Image: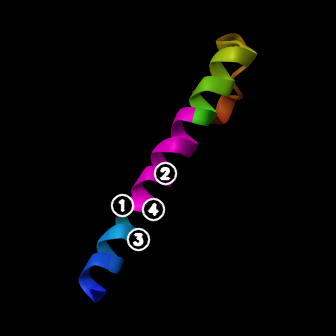
Amino acid sequence: MQKMNKLALMFGTILSAIAVTVTSTASWTILGTEEVPEELK
């Protein structure tokens, strides 16, 4: 049972990371690619 919990936690973490990446990418696209700060270029 312990192994399943660890696997579920890992899967959730990866899923969250993907969701955050997709969200930030989407907002940058909406804001306009020309307005990307120098640090991200």
| Above or below: residue 5 compared with residue 11 | below
Question: Is the residue marked by circle 4 packed among few (<14), some (14-19), or many (20+) residues within 10 Å?
Answer: few
Q: Give the CA separation, mark 2 to mark 1.
A: 10 Å
Question: Is the residue marked by circle 1 packed among few (<14), some (14-19), or many (20+) residues within 10 Å?
Answer: few
Q: Do the CB atoms of the residues marked 2 and 4 lie less than 8 Å apart?
A: yes
Q: Is mark 2 on a helix, strand or loop?
A: helix
Q: Name the residue under label 1.
A: 11
Mark with earlier residue (2, 1): 1
Residue 37 position in % (x across, y down): 71, 28
Nearer to us of marks 3 and 2 is 3
Q: Name the residue under label 2.
A: 17
Q: Toward which corner of the image does residue 28 lie, by quadrant? A: top right
Q: Do the CB atoms of the residues marked 3 and 1 lie less than 8 Å apart?
A: yes
Question: Mark 1 is on which residue type?
Answer: Phe
- Name the residue at 69% across, 23% down: 36
Q: Do the CB atoms of the residues marked 4 and 3 lie less than 8 Å apart?
A: yes
Q: Mark 4 points at which residue?
A: 13
Residue 18 position in % (x across, y down): 46, 44
